[in-house]
Image (spheres, helix red, strand yellow):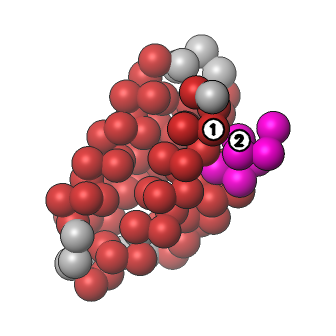
Amino acid sequence: MLSKFMGILDILLAFSLIFIKMDVYLKFVVFLAVLVAIKAFIFFDTLVSVADFISVLIIILSIIFGANFFLILVAIWLLQKGIFSLFS
């Protein structure tokens, strides 16, 4: 059950990254990024959590400096990880 919730969280964050470019729902994106950072900090002993933490850092940098190519990679990473979490 917890892994499915975390998968939904990853999928929501992946889809909400669309709004960074438009500056719409920016607080929602930051809220979801903080939740993923907390999740990554709790499970920091795995390589996937380290990748989540790096993803959150890229999201924060994209909010500050503007969206870039790495944000697309982060969205794809979070989306595929969320889908795999839902179906595992």
Q: Mark 1 packing: few (<14 Cα in 10 Å), some, or many (20+)?
A: some
Residue range highlighted in magenta: 82-88
> In this orientation, does residue 33 appear?
yes
Residue situated furthest right in the rendering: 88
Expressed as whole percent of the image width and height from the top left, the position of residue 25 reads 22, 70
Q: Mark 1 sits on what residue?
A: 4
Expressed as whole percent of the image width and height from the top left, the position of residue 3 reads 63, 31
Q: Mark 2 sits on what residue?
A: 85
Residue type for callout 2: Ser
Q: Residue placed at 27% from the left, 84% from the top?
A: 22
Q: Mark 2 packing: few (<14 Cα in 10 Å), some, or many (20+)?
A: some
Q: Quadrant of residue 51?
A: top right
Above or below, 55 against 20 in this view is: above
Residues tagged 2 and 1 counted as in contact (Cβ below 8 A): yes
Residues under labels 2 and 1: Cα distance?
A: 6 Å
* Label whose residue precedes the other's in the sequence (2 or 1): 1
